[in-house]
Image (tube, grey):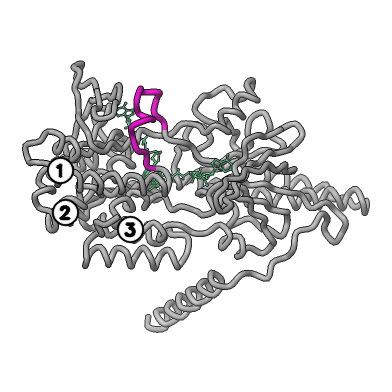
Amino acid sequence: AWKFTLYGILAGTTYTVYSLYRETNPYNQLPQSTTFPNGSKRKTIVILGSGWGSISLLKTLDTSLYNVVVVSPRNYFLFTPLLPSTPMRTIELKSITEPVRAIMRQRKGEVTYYEATANDIDIKNKKLTLQTTCHDDNENMQRELQLDYDYLVVGIGAQSTTFNIPGVYENANFLKEISDSEKIRLKVLKNIETASFLKKDDPERQRLLNFVVVGGGPTGVEFAAELNDYVSQDLKKWLPDISKDIKVTLVEALPNILNMFEKSLIDYTQTFLQKENIDLKLKTMVQSVDENIVTAKMDGKEVEIPYGVLVWATGNAPTQLAKKMMNDLKEEQTSPRGLLINDRLQMLGAEDSVFAIGDCTFHPGLFPTAQVAHQEGGYLAEQFKLLHQLDQCKWEMNTANTDNTKELNKLENKLNEPFKYIHRGTLSYIGAERAIVELTIGDNKFKMHGPFAFWFWKTVYLSMCLSFKNRALVAFDWCKTYFFGRDSSV
Ligand code: FAD
Ligand code: NAI
């Protein structure tokens, strides 16, 4: 047994040292070129986005087989599962981001990156229009660029939906990006400072301290839990008068929150949140929002909820570009919920050249989660390897007159294998160092909740971080918060 332990430790240490070396030293990359040494064309793949789907593809794709171009207005990957922990600074923002350029330089073949937004796709001519925003000292200069592609991968994610409810867009905060997290933080801290100016019986003071979260999906629950932790663990110590008056409300239209979980875990969470003094308003459908008040229907009656900070987390809607693509391919793209794809992740209407992955798509059985987008990226990397082999096979058949029919058939069969999503489980933080976990191993389901589930949740997310640097920073932030609490300055 000691021998195995020793080998295990040795293998673990070697892997860690090698990974650290790879992470901190760029690869000696193969340059991009128009042809391969045998004269065949080297095709271009343009990947849109730097989120879960696109980065998973970039990390597993053999970039020496194609000219790879990444286009994204966000020059970093964002580890969204820990985003709800950032507004109140349980975790620092920089701990959950990884620069795209660092990821690119760890690939075998050279990768080009454009910090830009794709705003038009000419599917027939395989052309893409990008808009870059170059920040000169005082001036914002926008430039346009045209790109040709052989294959396009659309991994542009989604935007927060408001269901066109009046006033939401103008008054609410969302939680999708780093900038959203920053805005929520500033608003919460500003309200706390303003409230401490006002007399205790001033109704404006109570309104400022009403923090309302709409949407009892995992984003809403995790953020409400983090906010409540900040109030009960930090403000209670440093600003007891204010902390007593803060009220966190979670509003959900359905009879239960976290509907993707098993019933006993939902019941546990709902009881737990109420015990933690989160005001849980179920069967409450928000209908309009103004500067200070949320108006909702609760059991058929109209209720008004005054708020100081409103965080809106009611799910996803397609982005502008996705809507434009759906409009351009009206006949094939018949769902308003996202880009329709087939089992090989090819976009309907442009199957020969466009693939779509992650939250921008709509496909029965595939949910808009990081888990799905990540697995889709991995599958596409494998598909691109097969497509390259197929191209080479055809090239040899044409130029050297070799009979590669058997090999060709084998590759085509492999290429036709559909994407199969393997659901590994769902986790959610619910506050006060508790989490709920539902694991799927083969056909078996395991569930747990409470402090042990919280440690499991931490271990899983730590292991899922993209780099050793992120892992170290997140672990450090957790320790810092545990010993010193959260920072309440701007
Ligand atoms: P994203 O990761 O959103 O990336 C989209 C990328 O496209 C971005 O880089 C964006 O800048 C870029 N882009 C947008 N428009 C354009 C354009 N026109 N041109 C070029 N680039 C463009 N899922 C889980 O499985 N587990 C979790 O714990 C979890 N927690 C979450 C917590 C929060 C707060 C949120 C908001 C989501 C969470 N999710 C979680 C869901 C998960 O984040 C998404 O499913 C996942 O990010 C989808 O990946 P994606 O690649 O499709 O899109
Ligand atoms: P969601 O779609 O999961 O939940 C939104 C909730 O808002 C629903 O319960 C809905 O009933 C409610 N709602 C809608 N309109 C409303 C209204 N007018 N008034 C009151 N309530 C209303 O959305 P969420 O949480 O933003 O998540 C988006 C995606 O990201 C999901 O697929 C989710 O699974 C994934 N995610 C996963 C996480 C995890 O696994 N821990 C964490 C965060 C997100």
Please report whichever mark, 1 or 2, sits nearer to the chain's N-terminal start.
2
* Residue density around tag 3, few if under 14, some if 14–19, many if 20 or more, within 10 Å: many
Task: Say whether residue 90 is left or right of residue 39.
Answer: left
Q: Main secondary structure of the magenta part?
A: loop
Q: Does the magenta run of residues contain 172?
A: yes
Please name the amino acid that badge 2 sits on. Answer: Leu
Spatial CA distance of label 3 from label 1 is: 22 Å
Pick the front one: 385 or 97: 97
Measured from the top left, where is residue 168 in percent x and y?
35, 28
Q: Residue at x 61, y 64 (%)?
A: 105
Q: Is residue 6 visible?
A: yes
Please name the amino acid that badge 1 sits on. Answer: Ile
Residue at label 3?
Answer: 91
Q: Quadrant of the N terminus?
A: bottom left
Pick the front one: 184 or 123: 184
Residue at label 2?
Answer: 235
Q: Which residues are magenta?
A: 161-175
> Mark 3 falls on what kind of element?
loop
Is the residue under label 2 in contact with that under label 1 (CB below 8 Å)? yes
Task: Say whether residue 488 is left or right of residue 380.
Answer: left
Mark sitting on residue 246: 1
Please name the amino acid that badge 3 sits on. Answer: Ile
Q: Is residue 378 visible?
A: no
Whether disc 3's CB lies below 8 Å from ligand 1 is answered: no
